[in-house]
Image (cartoon, coloured by chain):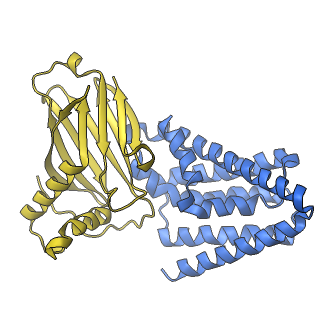
Amino acid sequence: MFYFNLGIRHITDLEGYDHMLFLLALTLPLSFGQWKATLKWITAFTVGHSLSLGLAATEVVRPPSEWVELGIAVTIAMTVGYHLINGFKVVQGAMWLSGIFGLIHGLGFGSYYSFIAQSDSFWWAWIPFNAGIEAGQILVVLVLLFVYWAVEKIWRNPKALKWMLSGVILTLSIQMILDRLSL
Amino acid sequence: MAQDPAVHTKVRHEFYVSVTDFHVDIEKGKITGVVKTFPDDWERAMNALLQEKVMRYVQLDSNQRAALHGQYLEQHIQLNLNGEAMAVEYFGTSRGPDEVYLLFTAEYGDKELEELSGNWSIKHTLLADIYPSQENIVIFHYDGRKQTNSCRESNDYRLNFNF
């Protein structure tokens, strides 16, 4: 249960807000009515994330952390760009994009997981840790979808909200990219 | 036993975490423990301790470092069994490729295994004075069983294990 909770806390940790920002970018076109797509996109991300986390933690792959951090920032900007190009429509390709970007995000957790995991229970802890990440993401996305729903009820102009959020996320992610390029 | 931890780690990290194993070691007749942490985090904590003396950690020889490690570790880990405090004693430092290991023991006298069951209470504030988001994961081993939890700000760096 400890590793499951740890996975949840990792996603909901506001200090590591790039993950949260990615979820915000990913869910821009979504709503409660599209729960199937929502679940697919999040699960695709978790699958990619879990896979690369395992590979990085076991040092099968060990890319430079500077490149991974830069890659994470780029995925946020690209996700917003993808939704802008598609006019905030729920398209099938987003699931694959989410999975591929999950691979990049998982690399960022590899060194952390290899540090905390016990050698005798490495994979036994890996399962609940990733399940916790999935649960944490679902929690965050539910909150986001509720906020979208509430704003739509009040504002009645969902596109404007999405454009505004896209602008904010793009600005923050470009700032992140510039920061990380100067490492 | 004491080796000098290097001043820098090759792995850049954005998280503040340590992992501590406590073993109820019946063969040795004491609690044995090891803290794993990052060398750069550890060096920063040591430098903070040395600030008043206007010294830097890199200036210390191995004996001075060992004394400083012991002072810091013993102040930041507290162990209780059923309300009875056990003094933590620093034992030595070892170095891995990207981590520092701090070894310690705690005497429990002539108690038998059965007398060592009950409520183990741990307060573990290592590096929390330097990094507010520090999380100290604790794995407690007792009679072939183990429990895992973490000391962090939200639980005031206190944990209870029941065996």
Residue A164 in the image, given as x and y percentages of width and height: 80, 72
Q: Is residue A152 left or right of residue B117?
A: right
Furthest-front residue in this view = A154
Residue A112 appears in view: yes
Residue A90 appears in view: no
Q: Colour of chain A?
A: blue
Furthest-right residue in this view = A156
Residue A18 in the image, given as x and y percentages of width and height: 60, 64
Q: Is residue A5 above or below residue A175?
A: above
Q: Report the label total.
A: 0
Which residue is at a point 87% across and 69% down the rendered structure image? A160
Q: In the image, which lettered chain appears yellow?
A: B
Q: Is residue A176 above or below residue B158?
A: below
Furthest-left residue in this view = B63
Which residue is at a point 61% across and 53% down the rendered structure image? A49
Q: Quadrant of the C terminus of chain B?
A: top left
Q: Is residue A12 left or right of residue A84?
A: left
Residue A151 in the image, given as x and y percentages of width and height: 84, 58
**Viewer-proximal residue, B144 or B33?**
B33
**Viewer-proximal residue, B38 or B50?**
B50
Furthest-top residue in this view = B114
**Viewer-proximal residue, A161 or B10?**
A161
Residue A65 in the image, given as x and y percentages of width and height: 48, 68
Which residue is at a point 38% across and 42% down the rendered structure image? A118
Which residue is at a point 16% across and 18% down the rendered structure image? B112
